Image (spheres, grey):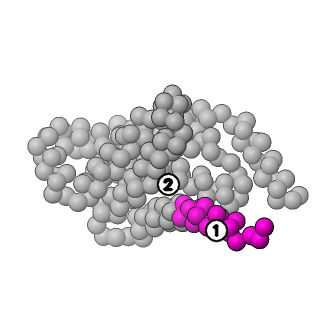
Amino acid sequence: MPAVSVTAALNRGLRRVPTGLIWLLGCVPAVWLTWLLFTGGLGVDPVAVYERELGLIALQFLLASLCITPILRWSGVNLIRFRRALGVLGFGYTALHLLVWVVLDKQFLWAEMGRDIIRRPFITVGMLAFLLLIPLALTSTDRALRHLGGHAWRRLHLLALPATVLAAAHYLLVVKSWPIEPILYLAAALALVGLRLFWHLRARTRRHSAPGRAENVPS
């Protein structure tokens, strides 16, 4: 069977997948981790494990949302309708990660948290990532898209690129010993952002060179 036919059949199947299924499956890790937290399944330091795993899942969802466009460009498989759910799930897990830090780790010690945000680079970077994600979450609805207009909405949602890189950098800085896993996550984030910049610059170059080519065509 030709590759085009396989891709078309796959896209037809994907159109029948309800986006609600993505939301449902996306919530499973949070429910499972919470169950383990309250049943003693997260080891001797359950809060640290709970906090770390929520942050890692957030990063995975953010990276998954950035993979949608390369997958479409390179394979023709269209997952665009699931990108919003993946991005919002990424924000949701980021918010849970932060909430665990505030409530269970720091126990609302606001002065101490303020000092940590200023003095500890990994917390500073993580907080910046969260702040960049807030406007994306607030404008993730169809109503926001209509209100802002397509062009402004797409420009705003480019904040997902630096936010994901900062989230990956936060993960690398947290572990301190620089094992291979967080390095690979950061490399993936940088590669995905680099791809978007490359495509943008190439498209811009083509737009600027098109008039010149047209002027050189003999009449």
**What is the span of residues highlighted in magenta in the rendered image?**
199-219
Rendered location of residue 20, percent (x, y): 59, 32
Quadrant of residue 209 in the image?
Answer: bottom right
Reading the image, the residue beneath label 1 is 212
Which element is circle 2 on?
A: helix
In the rendered image, is residue 28 in sight?
no
Seen in the image, is 192 located left or right of residue 178?
Answer: right
Magenta includes 119?
no
Q: At 40% from the left edge and 59% from the top edge, which residue is drawn?
A: 165
Seen in the image, is 125 located left or right of residue 16?
Answer: left
Mark 1 surroundings within 10 Å by alpha-carbon count, few (fewer than 14), some (14 through 19), many (20 or more): few
Which element is circle 1 on?
A: helix
Q: At 41% from the left edge and 34% from the top edge, which residue is drawn?
A: 138
Reading the image, the residue beneath label 2 is 63
Residue type at mark 2 is Leu
The residue nearer to you, when weighing 128 against 122, is: 128
